Image: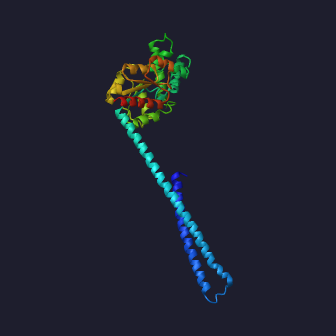
């Protein structure tokens, strides 16, 4: 039972006590009055026992008074608790409203207005589907199956480069293209089997969106896969743009796609932060003059990320939000 329900129950018992006390008082009074009249009637033949009848009425009146008093006490307790509960609820509501206003003010005054995310290893754990598809392709050509960790080490520069990194150096370009086609055919059928957002990512995106931050995605994964995964797994999140590997744009670490999304957000590069899990992502951000947060739950070790020199590290999705808020606090206090 909730506190509100307990308060209402107390008030109801108070009302019931009042009504019951009144009824008992009236019944007791009528009984006592009636029996006194009977005693006064000459020739009433019930003997001395009848003298006790009015006492029963007086007793009922006494019980009624006690029950009535209990009802009053319950009402006092109930309404007092209700007033305190309402005051506390209003105080909590006001505190929440003040926090929302303060956070909105921080966003308005703060530096960061947009966030650009990498996909694989940052938003989504795609390694199992990539591993299954790659192994189904390379084993046909006589190569041993790779573990998830081995595949993780070659992700990040496009799917063609993934294949190049797992085949023998003397493999011809024609053979590489054949293996790549087999890999893409297998991935086409299975790229959403095991892929899922990392824990806390969906909550992060919802929080950023609710606070007014503009969101974008840039991946070296093929455009159709990138856009389908975002559409299917983050259908409730609006993105300014979702860009994958496409003939129109050079791949990361070229800054072109980052600069394009910055323009689409209608902000400056200093007002956007890039979030990724690889050296390629960090280099992309540096090339675009955008601050970068390296997330440590992805496909690269911290020592590998250290070499690329990110501006910030996030060990959980929530830390991404905390870092952005911290940047905005700092810039707001300086303005």
Q: Picture quarter containing residue 53?
A: bottom right
Q: Residue furthest top?
A: 170
Asked whether 33 or 214 is in front, the reply is 33
Q: Residue at x 52, y 54 (%)?
A: 5
Q: Residue at x 51, y 12 (%)?
A: 168
Q: Is residue 231 above or below residue 72?
A: above
Q: Residue at x 59, y 78 (%)?
A: 32
Whether residue 251 appears in this view of the structure is: no
Residue 181 spot, x, y in % from top left: 46, 21
Asked whether 134 or 306 is in front, the reply is 306
Residue 120 spot, x, y in % from top left: 46, 26
Asked whether 260 or 188 is in front, the reply is 260
Q: Is residue 306 above or below residue 96?
A: above
Q: Residue furthest bottom?
A: 43
Residue 171 spot, x, y in % from top left: 48, 12
Residue 282 spot, x, y in % from top left: 42, 21
Q: Residue at x 53, y 70 (%)?
A: 22
What is the number of callouts on the image? 0
Whether residue 114 appears in this view of the structure is: yes
Q: Picture quarter containing residue 228?
A: top left
Colour mode? rainbow
- The C terminus, quarter of image: top left
Q: Is residue 269 above or below residue 232?
A: above
């Amino acid at each position: 039972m909730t506190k509100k329900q307990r308060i209402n129950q107390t008030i109801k018992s108070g009302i019931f006590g009042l009504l019951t006390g009144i009824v008992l008082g009236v019944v007791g009074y009528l009984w006592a009055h009636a029996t006194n009249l009977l005693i006064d009637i000459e020739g009433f033949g019930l003997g001395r026992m009848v003298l006790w009848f009015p006492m029963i009425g007086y007793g009922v009146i006494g019980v009624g008074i006690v029950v009535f008093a209990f009802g009053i006490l319950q009402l006092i307790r109930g309404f007092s608790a209700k007033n305190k509960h309402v005051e506390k609820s209003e105080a909590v509501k006001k505190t929440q409203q003040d926090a929302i206003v303060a956070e909105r003010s921080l966003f308005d005054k703060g530096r960061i207005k947009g966030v650009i995310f990498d996909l694989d290893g940052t938003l989504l754990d795609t390694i199992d589907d990539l591993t299954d598809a790659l192994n189904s392709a390379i084993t046909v050509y006589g190569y041993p199956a790779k573990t998830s960790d081995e595949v993780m080490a070659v992700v990040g520069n496009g799917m063609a480069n993934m294949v190049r990194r797992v085949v023998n150096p003397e493999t011809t370009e024609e053979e590489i293209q054949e293996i790549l086609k087999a890999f893409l055919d297998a991935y086409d059928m299975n790229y959403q089997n095991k892929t899922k957002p990392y824990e806390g990512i969906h909550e992060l995106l919802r929080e950023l969106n609710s606070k007014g931050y503009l969101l974008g995605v840039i991946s070296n994964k093929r455009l159709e896969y990138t856009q389908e995964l975002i559409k299917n797994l983050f259908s409730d999140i609006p993105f300014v743009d979702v860009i994958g590997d496409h003939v129109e744009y050079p791949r990361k670490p070229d800054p072109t796609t980052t600069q394009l999304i910055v323009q689409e957000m209608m902000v400056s590069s200093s007002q956007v932060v890039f979030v990724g899990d690889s050296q390629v992502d960090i280099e992309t951000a540096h090339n675009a003059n955008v601050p970068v947060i390296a997330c440590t739950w992805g496909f690269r070790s911290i020592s590998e990320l250290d070499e690329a020199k990110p501006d910030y590290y996030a060990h959980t999705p929530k830390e991404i939000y905390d870092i952005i808020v911290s940047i905005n606090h700092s810039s707001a206090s300086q303005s």
